Image (cartoon, grey):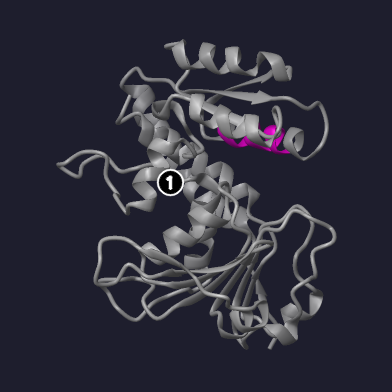
Amino acid sequence: MTATELDPSGVAAEFRAQVREDVTRLAADGRSLRVVGLLGQETGPAATYARFAGRGFQDVGIEFDLRHVAPDAVEAAVADANLDPEVDGVFLYYPLTDPRGDRWLRELVDPRKDVEGMHSFWSRLLYENQRFVDPDRSVRAILPCTPLAILKLLQKAGMRGTDPSAPLAGVTACVINRSELVGRPLAAMLANDGALVHSLDLTGSVTFEPAIGRHTHDVRDSGVTRAEALATADVVISAVPSRSFELIRGDEIREGAICVDVAEFTNFDPSVRERASVFVPRVGPLTIAMAARNLVRLTSVQ
């Protein structure tokens, strides 16, 4: 078996087309959209990501204002964007300070302008499996844009469950990385839709039990090894930001698994392509499309 490579650019184009229609509709009603991006580095991955994001927003008719800020000026810049009625969304490009400071900055962004979906207001709804903001279930909750992009790519790749009431029932997933930016919210999203998720990181493994027969998923220490998790997974997502990570090999994964590489440095050995059914080499273009989609949805709560 040779894996089909799924290019996220094509999937992103489909979502951008819908966002472009929404932006045009809002413009006809007199509502233009503007995102402020805050960047602390002139070069490197964050700067590259910011440039691509700018092109993505502009492509769908959203104004993008990228501001370069020093670490000691970031809090003030976030406050300015929050208070500016001409700003509809805020996008932070990490690192802006240090890991602890960046976590604090996420909490300073007004949730109504949080296109990344990383504020604790949105995280609480995700982890409690609350999919709407209002009791009438007319305003959808915002989901973190990178995990959401991964989920959309997995769906495009053919990830399906066996129960219409729980779309991922019967699916087993392995997520390597349990960061608050990617791994943990992605595991929760998969489990909330019915998947059994083995979540691995440097501290060990936990299992996200599917939200079947209860309102939300459950998390327990499991002790599942890397070998066990990879051998049983229908889908494998890895997002370890390190060159020293032991690459996932083809002989470790289940025949026909869907594999998604989210890391800055590849997490998969080339041999994986000889055993997987679908291989997704990157996620970035769809992440930007999901951020633009989130911005449109935020107009319902502003």
Q: Tell me if residue 195 comes above or below residue 86 in the rendering.
A: below
Verify whether residue 52 appears in magenta: yes
**Residue 277, position in %: x, y?**
61, 81
Residue at image location 31% in from the left, 60% down from the top: 216
Residue at image mark 1: 143
Q: What kind of secondary structure does the magenta stretch mostly adopt? A: helix
Q: Tell me if residue 267 comes above or below residue 53 in the rendering.
A: below
**Where does the C terminus fall, quadrant-wise?**
top left
Is residue 149 shown left or right of residue 188? right
**Residue 156, position in %: x, y?**
50, 66
The amino acid type found where label 1 is placed reads Leu
**Alpha-carbon neighbours of circle 1 within 10 Å: few (<14), some, or many (≥20)?**
many
Residue at image location 27% in from the left, 39% down from the top: 133
Viewer-side residue, 2 vs 188? 188
Q: Is residue 286 visible?
A: yes
Q: Tell me if residue 113 comes above or below residue 266 in the rendering.
A: above
Viewer-side residue, 54 vs 166? 166
Q: Quadrant of residue 219?
A: bottom left
